[in-house]
Image (spheres, rainbow, N blue to C red):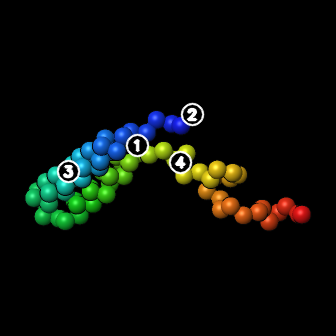
Amino acid sequence: MTPHRPPLAARLALLLSCLAMGAVIGAGGWLLTGSGHWFLALPAVIAIGWLFVADPTRCEATGGRAGAPDRPDPRSRG
């Protein structure tokens, strides 16, 4: 059974809302302090949003160790 995955429209809506939220935080902080560092909220909010929809099991290799390339184990002989 495959894990539940939100539909594309829902994922796009989440991405757009994360972009908007990060831009609002960045613009608000910039207006209050004059520092452009507040716009680092954009990737931070996107990363936090990604945690809600990410499925790390889709990144695992199908056979063997997770994330390992498909090649023989050098420790095995034969």
Q: Secondary structure at mark 4?
A: helix
Q: Residue at x 20, y 50 (%)?
A: 20
| Residue type pointed to by label 1 | Val
Residue ID at (51%, 36%): 3
Q: Determine the secondary structure under disc 2.
A: loop
Image point 55% across, 45% down: which residue?
A: 57
> In the rendering, which numbered label is found on residue 20?
3
Tell me whether the residue at label 4 lies in contact with that at label 1, contact meaning CB atoms closer than 8 angstroms.
Answer: no
Q: Position of residue 45 (x, y in %)?
A: 30, 51
What's the CA distance linking mark 1 and mark 2?
A: 18 Å
- In front: label 4 or label 2: 2
Q: Which mark is residue 58?
A: 4
Residue placed furthest toward the right: 78
Q: Position of residue 76 (x, y in %)?
A: 85, 61
Q: Is residue 49 above or below residue 36?
A: above
Query: Residue at label 2?
Result: 1
Q: Amino acid at mark 3?
A: Ala
